[in-house]
Image: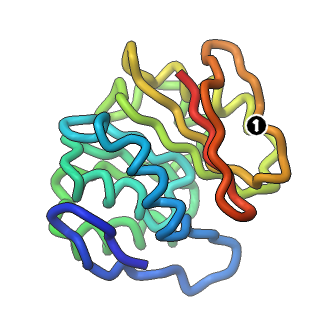
Amino acid sequence: MRIIAGTSKGRTLKAPKWEGLRPTSDKLRGTLFNILQHQIAGARLLDVFAGTGAIALEALSRGAASATCVDSDRRATALIAENAARCGVSERCVIIRDAVERALQQPLAGGPFDVIVLDPPYEYARIGEVVRDAARQRAGSGVIVLEHASRVAPPHADGVTLTRTVTSGDSALTFYS
């Protein structure tokens, strides 16, 4: 896993050494940032179910002003901190260890957010609720992106409008405004 573009281009990110964490592939991350390229510079990004922090760190490398990462696993938050230090962006990366459902119920550090990326486990059952709750963290014209299994229809949620879905292999990115 590497940072694809920007000031940290080519930096290798440390991968998890435990089961159950599915990092977004470099290819899918590249697709995501190609689509969002005009929305990243100066943006405040929220990375929910952050895992390795690769989405947030890619955004910071490409000029995002700040990134906030939320994950409930202490190993993941430690990994995000290590990867942020590797990229030299620790001061612009806030890391919150909390249950996603609880974290999204309150204003988060660094918000409201211009870009929110949700990357839950593919079997996660409450994704519609998380999309709805993430909308409360969004800046006025912000975008929410959900990564999910391409075999599963994206949820519709109150407070957002599904605008686009892009499929890549067994993964899909659904965009909400």
132 w.r.t. 172: above or below: above
Looking at the rendering, in which quadrant would you find the N terminus?
bottom left
61 w.r.t. 43: above or below: below
Percent of width and height locating residue 130: 66, 33
| Residue in view at x 63 percent, y 69 percent | 22
Percent of width and height locating residue 165: 65, 39
Q: Which of the two residues, 37 or 121, is positioned nearer the viewer here?
A: 37
Percent of width and height locating residue 156: 75, 24
In the image: residue 116, left or right of residue 157: left
When asked about the image quadrant of residue 2, the answer is: bottom left
> Could you tell me which secondary element the residue under label 1 belongs to?
loop
Percent of width and height locating residue 45: 35, 40
Q: Which of the two residues, 169 or 83, is positioned nearer the viewer here?
A: 169
| Residue in view at x 61 percent, y 25 percent | 163
Q: Amino acid at mark 1?
A: Pro
Which residue is disc 1 drawn over?
154
41 w.r.t. 34: above or below: above
47 w.r.t. 74: above or below: above
When asked about the image quadrant of residue 55, the answer is: bottom left
